[in-house]
Image (spheres, rainbow, N blue to C red):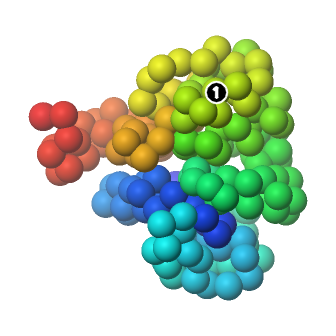
Amino acid sequence: MSKVCVFFAPGFEEIEALTVVDILRRAEIDVDMVSITGEKKVTGSHKITVEMDKLFEEVDFGQVDMIVLPGGMPGTKNLEAFEPLMKQVDAFYADGKYVAAICAAPSIFGHKGILKGKEACSNPAFESHLEGADVKNSPAVVSGKVITSRGMGTAIPFGLAILGQLKGEEAVSLMKEKLVFNL
């Protein structure tokens, strides 16, 4: 079974983070919501507080198949400023494991050089940060083991793209039916 960690920092975009968690849990994928703050409760950019499954320090990264970074402001900046998480993003990419980001968060991958020679997308205001990428105007882009998406309105396609990489297109079709999405 696949294991995914979605990382939460103060100011995360609630819909982007929780939509991914919801879709993957509906598909019976093991997902942990992880706080980088040292506290179990994290408040998003729209003042919605969510209780996490784990603290960063409790994650066994050897058991994790994918890191997901939601966007939001200042959530994206807070994620990027948390060096232990950035070391894990680098390690996952170097090891050929999945890394995924939505909205402003793909800018983190751009700053790290992860997007060089890859197709990617982000919130339009952050496209200039997708250094070296072939920027696409798509709801979600899968380029090798890197998955990116544009924002709150593309959270479902982002979750489905992640699901497709972990469980295949049949699982995506079934989930679309359950969600009444694009029927």
Image-quadrant location for residue 153: top left
- From the viewer's perspective, is residue 53 above or below residue 66? below
**In this rendering, would 79 be left or right of 23?**
right
Against 78, residue 48 (above or below) is below
109 vs 103, left or right, is right
Q: Quadrant of residue 138?
A: top left
Residue at the image position 17 percent from the left and 51 percent from the top: 178
The x and y percentages for residue 142 are 53, 28
Which one is in front, 43 or 179? Answer: 43
Answer yes or no: is residue 140 visible. yes
Helix, strand or loop at mark 1: helix
In the depicted structure, whether residue 124 falls above or below residue 63: above
Of the 4 image quadrants, the one containing the C terminus is top left
Residue at image point 77% right, 77% down: 57
User: Looking at the image, is 175 positioned above or below residue 24?
Assistant: above
Quarter of the image where one finds residue 115: top right
Q: Is residue 21 visible?
A: no
Q: Position of residue 160 (x, y in %)?
A: 38, 41
Q: Residue 94 at x, y = what percent?
A: 82, 38
Which residue is rendered at x = 64% and y = 33% of the image?
A: 126
Q: What type is the residue that disc 1 sits on?
A: Glu
Residue at image coords 55%, 42%: 103
Q: Position of residue 93 (x, y in %)?
A: 76, 39
